[in-house]
Image (tube, grey):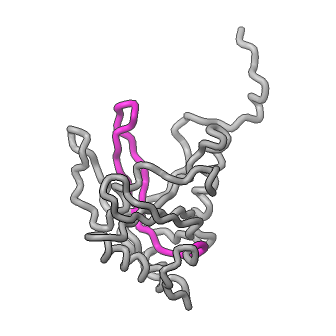
Amino acid sequence: MIQKPYGYDTAPIYGTGDLERVTPGGHICQIRGVKVEPDPRSGERIMKVAFDLAPQDAQAGIYQRIFGARQQSAGVDAQWPAVYRQNLDGKGTPYFKGFITSLEKSNVGYAWNWDETTLNGKLFGGVFRIEEFRGTDGNVHETVRISAVRSIDTVLDAAVPDPKRLSDNGASAAAYAPDQSAAAQEQLPFSSKGW
């Protein structure tokens, strides 16, 4: 007979596959923190935007709840689960300008002044879609990520994007996503130590 572990009755439940997940489609997002760092592959600057779903969204605070669960299992090594990455340079510049325009339209009176710290607390619209990825276990898994950014006045009417599926060899079968956000989010840079 197994002896019941200490704290079993009050322990959270993990590993059942029924974790809360963002529904695909449009959501109102709120910025929690911003970092600009060089991309280790290209050397171009990447803006990393940690966000949660805003209080006025139907799934408000979902990423804070997910992060709390991660902290209970991983402690100080837990990473923030929602990071939008935007390339600032080269081919990414027009998409960065689109991101900033969406922020200005979504936050009355806000004007971008090239200081990324002024983005904390600002709202933007995110259009989310299902994406497949190959996990470290070799199996195909699904996640939900931002595929496009919009202003908050148009995002809730956005069509739900088709899922981004993997081809048989594990590479993405979907067309190139011009906003560069979804494919770039595979490594979440924010740990609980830094936020």
Does the stretch in magenta take in 145? yes
- Position above or below: 100 against 64: below
- Position above or below: 113 against 161: below
Where on the picture, by quarter, is residue 87?
bottom left
Q: Residue at x 39, y 41 (%)?
A: 141
User: Can residue 160 be seen at all in this image of the molecule?
Assistant: no
Q: Residue at x 56, y 91 (%)?
A: 109
Task: Give the quadrant of the N terminus.
Answer: top right
Q: Which segment did they paint magenta?
A: 120-146
In the image, taking residue 168 as reference, residue 127 lies left or right, namely right
Give coordinates of residue 62: x percent, y percent. Answer: 59, 57
Give coordinates of residue 133: x percent, y percent. Answer: 35, 44
User: Can residue 9 be seen at all in this image of the molecule?
Assistant: yes
Q: Residue at x 50, y 82 (%)?
A: 106
Give coordinates of residue 148: x percent, y percent. Answer: 37, 68
- Position above or below: 91 against 42: below
- Report the predominant secondary structure element of the magenta stretch: strand
Give coordinates of residue 79: x percent, y percent. Answer: 56, 48
Q: Nearer the viewer, residue 15 or 181?
A: 181
- Position above or below: 28 against 77: below
Q: Nearer the viewer, residue 25 or 49?
A: 49
Q: Residue at x 58, y 56 (%)?
A: 63
